[in-house]
Image (cartoon, rainbow, N blue to C red):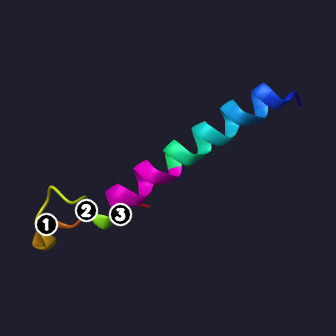
Amino acid sequence: MHIPEAITWLEYRLEYRLECYWKFAGGKQNNNNNQEVYG
């Protein structure tokens, strides 16, 4: 695996995990009473 490919892969994984985290946390835009757990 080349370095540029590794960086792209790491960025993709990071964005994916952040998206899942914010969905799990309900995001800061939603009320705490409206939290939904995915997965």
Q: Amino acid at mark 3?
A: Phe
For the question of whether residue 37 can be seen, the reply is: no
Instruction: Tell me residue 37's x, y (percent).
Output: 33, 66
Tell me the SS state at disc 3.
helix
Task: Determine contact: label 1, label 3, CB under 8 Å.
Answer: no
Tell me the SS state at disc 2.
loop
Dot 3, crowdedness within 10 Å: few (<14), some or many (≥20)?
A: some
Spatial distance from mark 3 to mark 2, Cα to Cα? 5 Å
Magenta part mainly helix, strand or loop? helix
First in residue order: circle 2 vs circle 1: 2
Instruction: Tell me residue 22's x, y (percent).
Output: 35, 57
Q: Nearer the viewer, residue 10 or 31?
A: 10
Dot 1, crowdedness within 10 Å: few (<14), some or many (≥20)?
A: few
**Residues rendered magenta in the picture:** 17-24
Spatial distance from mark 2 to mark 1, Cα to Cα? 7 Å
Instruction: Kindly identify which residue carries mark 2.
Output: 26
Instruction: Tell me residue 28's x, y (percent).
Output: 20, 60
For the question of whether residue 19 can be seen, the reply is: yes
Q: Which mark is residue 19?
A: none
Q: Which mark is residue 24?
A: 3
Task: Determine contact: label 2, label 1, CB under 8 Å.
Answer: yes
Instruction: Kindly identify which residue carries mark 1.
Output: 34
Q: Amino acid at mark 1?
A: Asn
